[in-house]
Amino acid sequence: MLFFHIQGARANSAGRFISLVQFYNPHGHLLRTLRVPGNGINSIAWEGSSMRMALAVDSFIYFADIQPEYQWACIDDVIVYAFAMPRKDEICVTFWNSKSNERFAKNVRGLIGICAFGDYCALISEASMKNTFALIICDAKGTALIGKYMEVRSGHFFINDFSLYDPFFLKEKPEFNVMTASQLITATDSCVYLWHYCSNEPNNAVTLQICRENRCTQKTVKVGIDPGTKVPESDSSRFTLRDSICSLAASENMLLVGMQSGAVRRYSLRSLRHEATYILESRACVSCDNTISHFLDMSVEQAFLQNIYLNCNDTKFSVIDIDGLMTVLDLNSASFHLSDPLHNQQLVTVNRRKDCRGMHWSRDMPDLYVTMEKKRMYLFRNGDPEEPVLSSGHVYDFSDLEIKAILLEEIMQTPQTPRKEHVVHFETKALRDTRSMILHNISFQDSWRFVQKNGHQRLWQLLAHGALQKLDLAIAKQSFANFADIYGVYFARKLEMICDEIQQRAEVSAFFQHFDNAEELFASMNRVDLSLAMRIKMGDWFHVGKIIRVGADDDWIRDFMFNNMGEYFFERQKWDRAASYFTQSKNVEKLVVCSYLQEEYDELEKIIHAAAGNHELLANIGSMFCSVGMCSQAVLAFRSTSDMNPGIEACVLLKRWGSAFSLVTQHNRQQITVVLQRYIGHILHAEMKLCAINLYRETNDHENVVHLLSQLAMQSVTVKHSPMYMKKIYVLRALEVSMHAMDSEPACCAVN
């Protein structure tokens, strides 16, 4: 990333000149303003091999570390970051699982931004078509799940097959992006695009466009000029260029849009309606542009909102402006009415910090947040800071009083080989103190008062577990109840009903998954049955086998153990080992499946004789033999059942017509005509007319015999067989006609 800087001074509200350095990208957009103490900056020099710079101010030399804005996001413990590949036009997006150390790379051309929420990540990039951008939703492995195209043309904003007219200037790229559980929200400097990526409807996108009067038509909410400011329509473009979008924040219920003037606009994501405009009390809403031509005049007090962060219950939000000033504001302090949303609202400032490069709200406590100020990390509870921690990491998760940060600078040095050491964890002071109080055997009454004062579910859990280890069941039960762990309450009650302290300690060890220690305690009590019950409950069947060899002799336990061992190997597709255990447990059904999967058909045939009387199992074995084309074995299995129809169908399916006809003749005379017709059809299709004639003669069907003999005689004339062969055909045909006449005479006499 390339930077250039401009040094100078500007006057603040008190009339005092402040020295500062402004950093710009190659396109002339202001990135950050650095305030420098002293009377004036004499010179600036960059370090040649890093992102550090030296500033000569009065008689001092100041050093500044410059941290570029990386493109990154997180999906639980999966870190998604982008870096430029050498000698390639594409950007490599890496999905790195910090726990398993798995990496999945995805090359993206023209990447603009990355954002994530929950289990999904969104990649915003330039498409191959001009002025078209691609929005792609990916999972934690980088697999593209769903995508959408967004097209921007001069004066128009196109979404798939419909367009909404935007009379204002549109920035070329949607650089501001935020993601919720159901929506992807991206914005240019004048339009906000909302995409319901979880919806299956074809038109599941809505556009919020900039306009001054907040006239909502066709689910289009206008954003840009303060809704209470009324100016002639001809001045709309001037106002739009001077006050445009610079940041976004969203939750499931609301959308906050930060403007370059310092105003923050609130919209409802349910009704898509403008609800209020908040004015920061520390800044005046000065209209200013973000291009370099407007920033050369440093006498103007600037209030660009670079980032907006919303807490977990939508009661507070924080903003960081272009100077690194962070302001935390209380949304409940504004007395606005939804029926009159055109009035600007003033919010109460909860906290203000300087030189902030980022912040992160806790996911489970609305008043808890962490800020990154220079090389320090501060944790705030209700506006009160804790002792700072030295860290240059980027926080990606803050929950359960534990902060997870990633060292992006170290990763970007070797981006293709990140290490687990690049992820650091920090604990809050309350969590550290609670753990220290429990480890140093401080009374649980004092610990109870401390946890009650700093109430959090993680602290109650620590106290409950510590009380269990000390067998203080009353404190443990109440602590489990305070963080709504009903199973923990039941467990504490169960321990109260146990009189033996050794057994209580064994149960507590099993609760904390120290099973070997629990088994040793049970063994010291000579309670093999409790050890056996514990291992059976946890499904550790190999330890169950060891315990059975020591002291248990029940056959049903052995069969149960061998059967579950067989299931263990069966689930892992180790059929041979599973079959051995199923044999010991006498589970014939599973043994049949294992033999079939191993293609051990001899063993499967032996089971037929051993499973006499089990008609359902024999039918399954017959179906297995039929599926591999072993007709005789299938017939043998079906013959052992009371129903022979599946055996006949198997013979027909495998085209063993002789066996099928034999089975029909022996067992089922009602199907003989159907099977015979199918068999003869098969024979005639194979041009075996003599075999068909013999079958018809066996069934005394003289009419079909005469018909086939006539066809055979005509065919012999064409082929020019010998006269003797043709004579035999005609003589046989005459005999069949006479036999047909003799069979039909009794019927004629009966009719007369």
Image (tube, grey):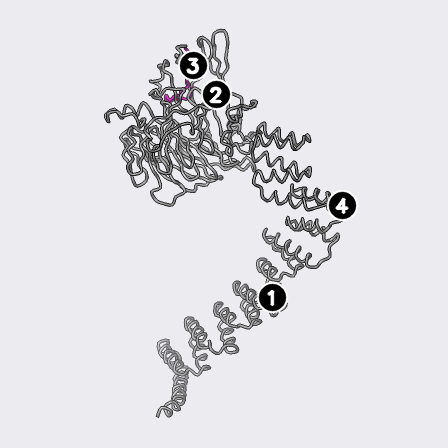
Q: Residue furthest top?
A: 59
- Residue type marked 3: Leu
Secondary structure found at label 4: helix
Residue 479 seen in render: yes
Q: Which residue is mark 2?
A: 353
Looking at the rendering, which quadrant does residue 307 occupy?
top left
- Residue type marked 1: Glu
Look at 72% across and 43% down and name the residue there.
501
In 3D space, how far apart are the residues under numbered discs 1 and 3 (Cα atoms)? 90 Å
- Residue type marked 4: Ser
Q: Does label 1 or label 3 sit earlier along the sequence?
A: 3
- Residue type marked 2: Arg
As drawn, 243 above or below 672: above
Q: Foreground residue, 26 or 313?
A: 313
Q: Which residue is mark 1?
A: 605
Q: Which mark is residue 524?
A: 4
In 3D space, how far apart are the residues under numbered discs 4 and 1 (Cα atoms)? 50 Å
- What crowding class fits label 1: few (fewer than 14 Cα within 10 Å), some (14-19), or many (20 or more)? some
